[in-house]
Image (cartoon, rainbow, N blue to C red):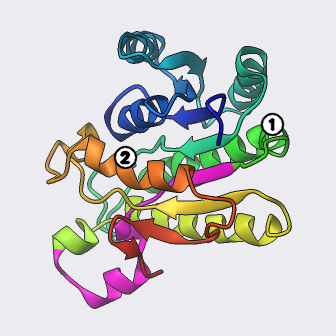
Amino acid sequence: MSETTTALVTGANKGIGYEIAAGLGALGWTVGVGARDDARREAAVQKLRAAGVDAFGVPLDVTDDASAAAAARLVEERAGGLDVLVNNAGVTGGVPQEPTTVDLAAVRAAVETNVIGVIRVINAMLPLLRRSASPRIVNMSSGVGSLTRQAASTDPFVTGPLSVAYAPSKTFLNAVTLQYAKELRDTNILINAACPGFVATDLNGFRGVRTPEQGAAIAIRLATLPDDGPTGGFFEDAGVVPW
């Protein structure tokens, strides 16, 4: 990939998303900082620019069709195209999430952002990605979305807390990633799901044991895959994550 590579990272104003933007920017890429909150987005852009990154803000609410369409237009106007999309924006859906007592609004919230939002943004950005020489899509998933791990362990460090909204939304996202890979298999677009590990972010009350920078590493690796790299996979730092 050339130094003119352009990436868009959703939910990039803080945490893992910010570190993904910083890591890609350190490669000499132009990076769009996608975020809903104007003040936080602008603060992140200024911080990245201070570090030497060619960053620009992209107002983006992944739950809104018009916002996604406007974001695609802005990226094209600002950068002329798009090479890499990292779908990082996500929510837990709130607590508690015990299956027998959950508020169904929590499930809807998790799916709307973590799954439907990803589909919405991918489809809005696909016309730009199709014009790229080496387009990549990275969907930030989680190991808690692994059905294999959920079925084999009761260790909360493996499966996360009991969750009928967040964890299944990541399983759903993994399935969506596979469907895109199947449809796009005859194109040059590589799409994969990434597990950042148990990272200390505000999403989990900073209970994680990894830093956001460590969590960003797998996304950066998948964003920079060679043209003969994998597609339709689920990866973490140690390798393939079982479905």
The residue under the point 51% across, 23% down is: 36
The residue under the point 42% across, 39% down is: 20
Q: Secondary structure at mark 1?
A: helix
The residue under the point 85% across, 41% down is: 131
Say whether residue 133 is left or right of residue 177. right
User: In the rendered view, would you say 18 is above or below 90?
Assistant: above
Say whether residue 98 is left or right of residue 194. left
Residue 7 appears in the picture as rendered: yes
User: In the rendered view, would you say 27 is above or below 234?
Assistant: above
Query: Which residue is at the far bottom?
Result: 152
Say whether residue 207 is left or right of residue 34. left
Mark 1 residue type: Leu
Percent x, y of residue 63 = 61, 37
Position of the N terminus, as image quadrant, is top right
Give the magenta-colored segment's residue range.
136-155
Q: Which numbered tag is attached to residue 128?
A: 1
Q: Which numbered tag is attached to residue 26?
A: none
Q: Name the quadrant containing residue 161.
A: bottom left
Distance between mark 1 and mark 2 Cα atoms: 24 Å
Q: Is residue 20 or residue 106 the one in the foreground?
A: 20
Q: Name the quadrant containing residue 21.
A: top left
- The residue pinned by badge 2 equals 216
Mark 2 residue type: Ala
Mark 2 nearby-residue class (10 Å; few <14, some 14–19, many ≥20) = many
